[in-house]
Amino acid sequence: MAERTDSTGPKAEERRDSPRVPMSFHVRRAGTEAAFEPRDGDLSLGGCAFRGAALEPGTQLEVRFRLPSLTDELKVRGEVLTASEAAQQPATTRVRFLELPVEAELAIARHLHDVEQSAPKH
């Protein structure tokens, strides 16, 4: 989902309704040759969240992760939306994917659906 949405429109509702599943990411600032840093977090349809050092909102990132259904790693660009810190906890950084190719968005949607379907029902 490449378009920017405000928090009150219908797209915001869709984003909140998207399941979030645990995922490991490799992250670095976009446009650098720095090493990718591993981060644990969660994946949703429009982006991801991960724990680690707080990053400034607006920071552009390169994010890599692997979905079980794909042979190649997904490499996407993202923008930091927020970073929240809690006492004695690593910061949680929320990232919105930018210019996500349709094939990648569909692969993420399939993965989220598969994980949701395999989760035990309460």
Image (cartoon, grey):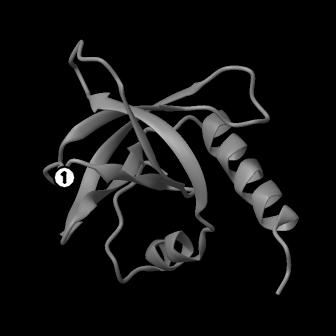
Q: Quadrant of residue 9?
A: bottom left
Q: Amino acid at mark 1?
A: Ala
Question: How many numbered circles are shown?
Answer: 1
Q: Is residue 38 left or right of residue 117?
A: left
Residue name at image x 18 percent, y 72 percent: 87
Tell me where residue 25 appears, x and y as whole percent: 47, 38
In the depicted structure, whether residue 117 falls above or below residue 57: below
In the displayed structure, 48 sits above or below 29; it is: below
Nearer the observer, 52 or 93: 52
Give percent across and percent down for residue 29: 23, 30
Q: Residue furthest top?
A: 33
Relative side of 57 to 5, left or right = left
Tell me where residue 39 sits by quadrant: top left
Residue 58 image point, x, y percent: 17, 49
Secondary structure beneath dot 1 equals loop
Q: Residues within 10 Å of mark 1 (few under 14, many from 20)?
A: some
| 27 or 51, nearer to the observer | 51
Q: Residue at x 68, y 37 (%)?
A: 67
In the rendered image, which residue does mark 1 sit on?
A: 54
Q: Answer above or below: position of 55 versus 29.
A: below
